[in-house]
Image (spheres, rainbow, N blue to C red):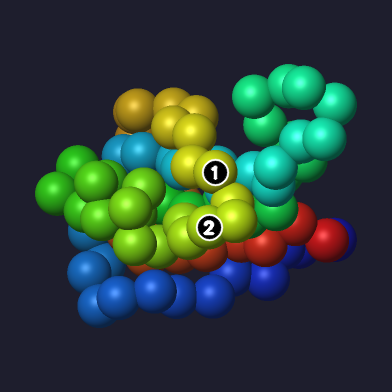
């Protein structure tokens, strides 16, 4: 099944960073299940972490290298 991609912002630069938005964990771990994936360029990576992934989700930078086929502002929510 192909994931549904929605857009945040207007930048269309190639994504270089993947920010995972994870829910709070009740079992004492630092984070819980993956809720969303937000892709950003280097310029918007900080904005993605502080404005695009919002509480109660916790942002985690998953990778910092070119992300094939994704653009800055692409968002994929977990099913």
Residue 40 in picture, x, y percent from top left: 33, 51
Image quadrant containing the C terminus: bottom right
Within-10-Å neighbours for mark 1: few <14, some 14–19, many 20+:
many
The relative height of residue 7 versus residue 24 in the rendered view (above or below) is below
Residue 6 in picture, x, y percent from top left: 54, 75
Image quadrant containing the N terminus: bottom right
**Residue in view at x 34 percent, y 62 percent:** 51
Within-10-Å neighbours for mark 2: few <14, some 14–19, many 20+:
few
**Residue in view at x 45 percent, y 75 percent:** 7
The relative height of residue 34 versus residue 64 in the rendered view (above or below) is below
User: Along the horizontal axis of the image, is 60 left or right of 64?
Assistant: right
Q: Secondary structure at mark 1?
A: strand
**Residue in view at x 44 percent, y 32 percent:** 61
- In the depicted view, which residue is nearer to us: 32 or 34? 32
Q: Residue furthest top?
A: 29
User: Along the horizontal axis of the image, is 29 left or right of 38?
Assistant: right
- In the depicted view, which residue is nearer to us: 44 or 16? 44
Is residue 5 something one can see in this rendering?
yes
As measured in the structure, the alpha-carbon distance from the residue carrying label 1 to the one carrying label 2 is 7 Å
User: Along the horizontal axis of the image, is 79 left or right of 48?
Assistant: right
Q: Which residue is mark 1?
A: 58
**Residue in view at x 27 percent, y 46 percent:** 45
Please give the label number shown on residue 55: 2
User: Along the horizontal axis of the image, is 36 left or right of 60?
Assistant: right
Is residue 68 something one can see in this rendering?
no
Residue 44 in picture, x, y percent from top left: 21, 53
Please give the label number shown on residue 14: none
Q: Secondary structure at mark 2?
A: loop
The relative height of residue 1 versus residue 69 in the rendered view (above or below) is below
Q: Are marks 1 and 2 in contact (CB under 8 Å)?
A: no
């Amino acid at each position: 099944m192909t994931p549904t991609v929605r857009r945040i912002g207007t930048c269309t630069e190639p994504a270089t960073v993947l920010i995972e938005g994870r829910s709070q964990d009740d079992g004492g771990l630092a984070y819980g299940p993956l809720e969303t994936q937000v892709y950003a360029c280097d310029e918007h990576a900080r904005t993605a972490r502080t404005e695009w992934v919002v509480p109660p989700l916790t942002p985690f930078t998953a990778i910092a290298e070119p992300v094939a086929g994704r653009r800055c502002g692409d968002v994929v929510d977990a099913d």
